[in-house]
């Protein structure tokens, strides 16, 4: 197949052919864009164009953004959409057909496999990590396929071996590298045919440019099964235009002094910061090393050493080994040393570590920076990664957690280079050191305390712990139930100033528990959190470890009451109880609320406001705003008190349970029965319930939820300007705790989805991509 495509040598050496069926009467050649999100200086695109010309067929660029890649989140999806928007501009200027498929509700595949049956050939970016290697095999079962290395200067098919030390890789590849560093990438002057009229894709394509201009991608991402708690990064924009603009500026301002500044993590401009764009293939490594070699000097020399030795070493290693992220990938001497240590330290739990609450100031600051900004200085990452083995007893698990944090939050995560960087902390590409350390064994030591001493820590902390969105926002939240407190927790973790206003006397909402009178906590509200999203189960793992909750079949059950869980979620938040918000209005660049307390009226102003009340209350509060809210809740009445066994049958609409070793009785009325006596006073409710049961009313109490659980609503967050509305009517499945959590997390993520104007991209395109 490759011999018949008339590929020049600089392209042919980058190709790996996967045989597959030869489809009759093919429609096109497919360029399957997955890890090199660019068209300029793209070997994959060039091979696809040459193949389309050789086969005399149209070329179709298919860019799939899937929900199934590891740690799929709003952060990574938004970055990918920004890249897709630049590619759309470039493809349009070249007259090439380009389709973006975002896997989402109503548009889940496998569409590429279906399209491959209509193709003569699929050309895609070479990918060595799971699940992309499995997806390559799946597509090649439908059509011939060529993988092309668009990530390395020295193509992996040319070398592709694993060396145990960087200097051995340098010695083995130096001559081949030198012959490629300064090469100008040949420009193809021809353009492929267009797809025939009448052919339609098997999915609804996405216009990334339109979605980003409309609402920053919020509507689109709300349909995706991805983690909204990993929010988009607002200080690094995805796409080839932003990548080239950043790279060119740093070449002018930072490259010459790179050798002297690169290890100072407090000096943000001391390193290039291009790893997110390099990871997603939005910036060609061939272009980067050619520019650095042209500029020259000590800084460029050291930068080229990092690019051509350390980065490429990791790429070729991942190509050569099976399961590059597995513990078995660590050298035997390192595994043996760590597994044979006498573990003594008892560190923080994983959930506290994830939030940057380990108790180690430098480590926590690095982790907070990763959560908020999606990046970590590589010199700090080498220290950060060493700490896991001192806090987690099983070394393989310690490495797994370190990789999970890196891959989940870092924009350059799930990349052979950053994976190898984390694994270096456990001995990969290093040698043994002695005498053995009690915690790290023969692994090289790198203590956070020592690192902090050589670092301007206040300066470092000032940018790692700076809030998302460019600085701390004042955010008001109306409603202190599950959705309001969870939104507050997320925003607080992202560095924002959060105030919660709640009309109740304590945390609880519809999860309330009361004292039965005998010292027992009586769960008169919900007894479990149902339909919990998978990403929340990860966040709740620490509470399981602390014995606060249990998780069974997607539901959370408290060991005591759900109120105790709410108190944990709301810990550290500024919560004002017995405060009823009476009015919301927008005032220019802020939102004002009028609050009635027991003693006075308060007016507060916020940058953003989140309404987290039952849907009927939200409709009333937001009646003067352009939100078009809809939905309905069912009511629920509960009564309880001391009681003997019933003499007759349980009345219709009553659900009876016992507490206090059978001495007490609790009755929950179904929605139909609750509606019938909803306007009764609590005393009248007690009288009605006990009368029907045939028991004494003495010692009985009652509670009323006029709005207990949503039974209809939009199922998605409603936002307008600076106001968002959340709760169980604004998430899925409607009426569940999962909906409350889902809507809270998506509302927080949406705050970070600032729309991108077309002018930004076009200006960048004209100034940095003049050869388009």
Image: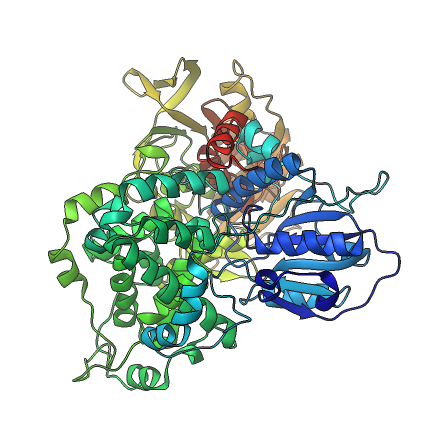
Q: Nearer the viewer, residue 317 or 3?
A: 3
The type of colouring in the image is rainbow
Q: Residue at x 21, y 41 (%)?
A: 462
Q: Is residue 700 visible?
A: no
Q: Is residue 176 left or right of residue 142?
A: left
Q: Residue at x 48, y 58 (%)?
A: 662
* Percent position of residue 501, x then y: 36, 29
- Which residue is most to the left? 453
Q: Is residue 537 left or right of residue 668?
A: left
Q: Is residue 445 visible?
A: yes
- Residue 616 occupies which quadrant of the picture? top right
Q: Quadrant of the N terminus?
A: bottom right
Is 146 drawn above or below residue 599 in the view shown? below
* Percent position of residue 444, x then y: 23, 75
Q: Quadrant of the C terminus?
A: top right
- Which residue is most to the right? 25
* Percent position of residue 381, x then y: 29, 60
Is 758 drawn above or below residue 208 in the view shown? above
Q: Residue at x 29, y 50 (%)?
A: 271
* Percent position of residue 313, x then y: 41, 69
Q: How many marks?
A: 0
Is 403 drawn above or below residue 562 in the view shown? below
Q: Nearer the viewer, residue 530 or 366?
A: 366
């Amino acid at each position: 197949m490759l011999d018949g495509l008339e590929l020049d040598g600089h392209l042919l050496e980058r190709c790996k052919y996967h045989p597959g069926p030869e489809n009759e009467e093919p429609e096109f050649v497919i360029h399957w864009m997955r890890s090199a999100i660019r068209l300029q200086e793209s070997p994959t695109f060039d091979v696809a164009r040459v193949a389309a010309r050789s086969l005399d067929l149209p070329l179709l660029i298919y860019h799939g953004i899937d929900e199934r890649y590891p740690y799929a989140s709003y952060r990574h999806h938004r970055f990918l959409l920004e890249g897709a928007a630049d590619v759309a501009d470039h493809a349009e200027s070249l007259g090439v057909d380009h389709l973006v498929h975002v896997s989402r509700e109503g548009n889940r595949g496998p569409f590429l496999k279906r399209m491959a049956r209509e193709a003569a050939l699929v050309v895609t970016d070479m990918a060595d990590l799971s699940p992309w290697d499995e997806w390559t095999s799946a597509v090649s079962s439908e059509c011939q396929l060529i993988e092309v290395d668009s990530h390395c200067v020295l193509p992996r098919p040319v070398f592709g071996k694993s060396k145990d030390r960087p200097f051995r890789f340098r010695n083995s590849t130096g001559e081949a590298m030198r012959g490629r560093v300064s090469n100008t990438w040949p420009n193809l002057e021809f353009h492929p045919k267009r797809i025939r009229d009448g052919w339609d894709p098997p999915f609804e394509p996405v216009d990334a440019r339109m979605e980003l201009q409309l609402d920053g991608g919020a509507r689109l991402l709300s349909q995706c099964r991805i983690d909204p708690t990993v929010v988009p990064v607002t200080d690094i924009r995805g796409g080839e235009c932003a990548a080239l603009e950043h790279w060119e500026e740093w070449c002018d301002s930072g490259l010459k002094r790179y050798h002297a500044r690169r290890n100072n993590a407090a000096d943000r401009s001391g390193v290039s910061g291009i790893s997110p764009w390099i990871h997603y293939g939005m910036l060609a490594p061939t272009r980067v090393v050619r520019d650095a070699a042209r500029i020259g000097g000590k800084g460029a020399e050291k930068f080229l050493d990092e690019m051509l030795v350390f980065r490429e070493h990791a790429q070729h290693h991942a190509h050569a080994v099976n399961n590059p992220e597995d513990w078995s990938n660590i050298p035997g001497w390192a595994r043996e040393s760590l597994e044979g240590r006498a573990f003594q330290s008892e560190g923080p739990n994983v959930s506290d570590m994830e939030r940057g609450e380990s108790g180690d100031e430098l480590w926590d600051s690095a982790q907070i920076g990763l959560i908020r900004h999606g990046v970590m200085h590589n010199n700090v990452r080498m220290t950060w990664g060493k700490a896991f083995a001192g806090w987690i007893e099983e070394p393989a698990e310690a490495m797994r957690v370190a990789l999970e944090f890196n891959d989940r939050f870092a924009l350059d995560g799930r990349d052979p280079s950053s994976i190898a960087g984390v694994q270096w902390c456990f001995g990969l590409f290093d040698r043994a050191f002695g005498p053995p350390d009690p915690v790290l064994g023969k692994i090289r030591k790198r203590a956070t305390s020592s690192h902090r001493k050589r670092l301007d820590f206040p300066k470092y902390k000032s940018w790692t712990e700076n809030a998302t969105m460019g600085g701390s926002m004042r955010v008001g939240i109306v409603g202190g139930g599950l959705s309001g407190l969870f939104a507050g927790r997320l925003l607080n973790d992202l560095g924002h100033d959060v105030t919660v206003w709640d009309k109740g006397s304590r945390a609880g909402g519809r999860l309330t528990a009361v004292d039965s009178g005998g010292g027992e906590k009586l769960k008169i509200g919900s007894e479990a959190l149902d339909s919990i999203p998978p990403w929340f189960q990860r966040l709740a793992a620490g509470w399981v470890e602390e014995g606060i909750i249990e998780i069974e079949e997607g539901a959370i059950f408290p060991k005591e009451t759900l109120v105790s869980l709410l108190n944990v979620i709301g810990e550290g938040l500024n919560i004002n109880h017995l405060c009823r918000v009476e009015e919301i209005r927008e005032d220019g660049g802020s939102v004002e609320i009028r609050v009635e307390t027991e003693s006075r009226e308060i007016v507060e102003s916020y940058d953003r406001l989140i309404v987290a009340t039952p849907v009927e209350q939200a409709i009333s509060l937001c009646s003067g705003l352009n939100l078009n809210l809809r939905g309905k809740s069912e009511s629920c009445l509960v009564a309880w008190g001391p009681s003997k066994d019933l003499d007759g049958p349980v009345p219709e609409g009553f659900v009876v349970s016992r507490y206090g070793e059978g001495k007490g009785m609790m009755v929950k009325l179904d929605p139909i029965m609750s509606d019938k006596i909803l306007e009764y006073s609590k005393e009248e409710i007690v009288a009605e319930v006990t009368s029907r049961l045939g028991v004494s009313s003495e010692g009985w109490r009652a509670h009323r939820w006029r709005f207990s659980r949503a039974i209809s609503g939009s199922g998605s967050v409603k936002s307008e300007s600076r106001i968002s509305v959340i709760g169980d009517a604004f998430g899925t499945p409607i009426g569940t705790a999962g909906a409350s959590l889902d809507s809270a997390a998506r509302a927080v993520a949406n705050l970070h989805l600032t729309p991108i104007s077309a002018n930004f991209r076009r200006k960048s395109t004209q100034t940095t991509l003049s050869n388009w």
